Image (tube, grey):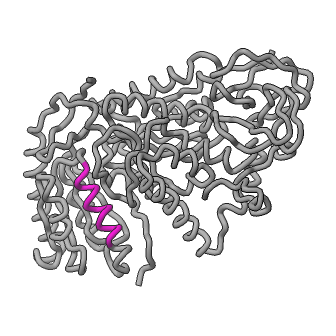
Amino acid sequence: MKKVFVVYATDNVGTVVLEPIRSGDHVTCNGERRDIEIVAHDDIAYGHKIALMDIAAGDTVLKYGLSIGSASCDIRAGDHVHTHNVESNRGRGDLADRGAVSAE
Amino acid sequence: MAEFMGFLRPNGDVGIRNHLLILSGTVYANGVVERVADTIHGALPITHANGRCQVAPDLRVTRRYLAGTAMNPNVGGVVIVDHFKEEGMTAEDLADDIAPTGKLIATVNIRGDGGFISAIEKATRYAQDFARRISLYQREAAPMSKILFGTECGTSDTTSGLGSNPANGLAGEILIAQGGRMLMAECTEWMGCETWLTEKAASPAVAEAIIAGVRHMESRALASGEDIRGSQPTGDNMAGGLTTIEEKSMGAVKKIGDSPIIEYLEIGEAPTRTDPGNYVMYGPGMGAESISSMAAAGCQVLTFCTGGGHTSNHPVMPTIKVTANRQSFELMRDTVDVDVSGVFRDEITLAEAGQIVYDELERVCNGYLTKSEALRDNNSFAIHRVGPSI
């Protein structure tokens, strides 16, 4: 059983800080959230994140209990979470007309 | 209410150290300052490259750094040396700034006092007298609410945002619960989490100042031809697993906890408020300039959170290095004070890690030497420049 670290109880992602994760590994959590067991769908390197639950396209990705961006497609529990499926909500001039840019 | 044993100063401040400073007014007094400090037991030389040919706003910042460092509660006495006369910042100007603290102050002018050799003699005699007089000061009980706790992070890695920084934020909350104050600078790192900060602002004015501070730092970067935001997170950040600027910034600012932000300060400026809570200060990400601005603001103690390991130590303000990277701790065991990497191995909780950091802070406030203090590796006095040399 591999472990990832969860820094805040409401987070929906965990971070690999011990041994790297291999696709197919069973994964549980250390830190502030321990009620979750998932199966990894990807290889996930040190410092990278794994989804602890399904995150629908457009939903908020939470780390530190705060938004680190939005899912740019549906993310399944166990997926690698990174730039290919999360987009920043900051500095997004292209989204300004949708009111999605937070106050600077 | 918890207490510590500190040095009560005439103005009500409480120091955790009892230093004698030999302070350079200008770069050209550094030689005299170093000779005097070499001679006198426990004297700390403060030398720098500034004090001449600076534009007025820049010279004001230098003056705030120099006077503030001497005004720091950890200083019992100061001998100021300058070489001739710099309009806007003579040794007497600095002495005037420091005088309200009521501590021992003397000034020496290299030209006025008869040259290098005579200036060394005069300054050495003052310093000998001061060293003996402040050695009579005894530690007395004082409330922890007297502590202004500075915090910084540098050479950060994956473990910083997840381990050492949040543990540090929790340590700050323990101090704030006892009436203390925590100060965070480095507004470069607030970019991307302004909302989290402004939501904690105690007033709309504080929130506006936070936004203005970030914009100002951003405009400095733009004026240099660099867009620090267009390339954030950097390529190596992303390779390391950081996905967005929000994620990167949050990892940095989480070194303060959830308490309200009481006041926004300009660089090197002392708080005007005494309310328990968080305080934030305008300033660069450059570690030595940043921690020196916090010492000038009156922080008696600082935690320096690091991932890769760091040697930073301020001469006047004990600098406690905290890491959650076990390998860095092992490699730099003589330099890094606290290892909270146990949070990742399920040995301790984040709350326990916060308590470990706080306990170390309390010990250092009571006189326990940090590792870098014991080594006298006083490498991190540096002054932020806001203008060119003319």
Residue A40 showing in the rendered view: yes
Classify residue B232 as left or right of residue B239. Answer: left
Classify residue B311 as left or right of residue B121. Answer: right
Q: Residue at x 60, y 23 (%)?
A: B343
Give the image quarter of residue B88. bottom left
Task: Report the number of numbered marks.
Answer: 0
Magenta residue check for B250:
no
Classify residue B64 as left or right of residue B174. Answer: left
Classify residue A59 as left or right of residue B333. Answer: right
Magenta region, residue range:
B60-72
User: Where residue B317 sits in the image (x, y, percent)?
Assistant: 33, 45
Foreground of the two, B89 or A52: A52
Magenta residue check for B62:
yes
Q: Is residue A92 above or below residue B309?
A: below
Foreground of the two, A91 or B331: A91
Farthest residue in the bottom direction?
B390
User: Where residue B193 sits in the image (x, y, percent)?
Assistant: 60, 49
Q: Is residue B149 above or below residue B78?
A: above
Give the image quarter of residue A73. top right
Q: Is residue B288 above or below residue B116?
A: above
What kind of secondary structure does the magenta stretch mostly adopt? helix
Q: Quadrant of the C terminus of chain B?
A: bottom left
User: Where residue B290 sits in the image (x, y, percent)?
Assistant: 44, 55
User: Where residue B94 sits in the image (x, y, percent)?
Assistant: 20, 66
Give the image quarter of residue B383. bottom left
Residue B335 showing in the rendered view: no
Q: Residue at x 76, y 61 (%)?
A: A97
Foreground of the two, A48 or A52: A52
Q: Residue at x 37, y 35 (%)?
A: B370
Q: Quadrant of the N terminus of chain B?
A: top left
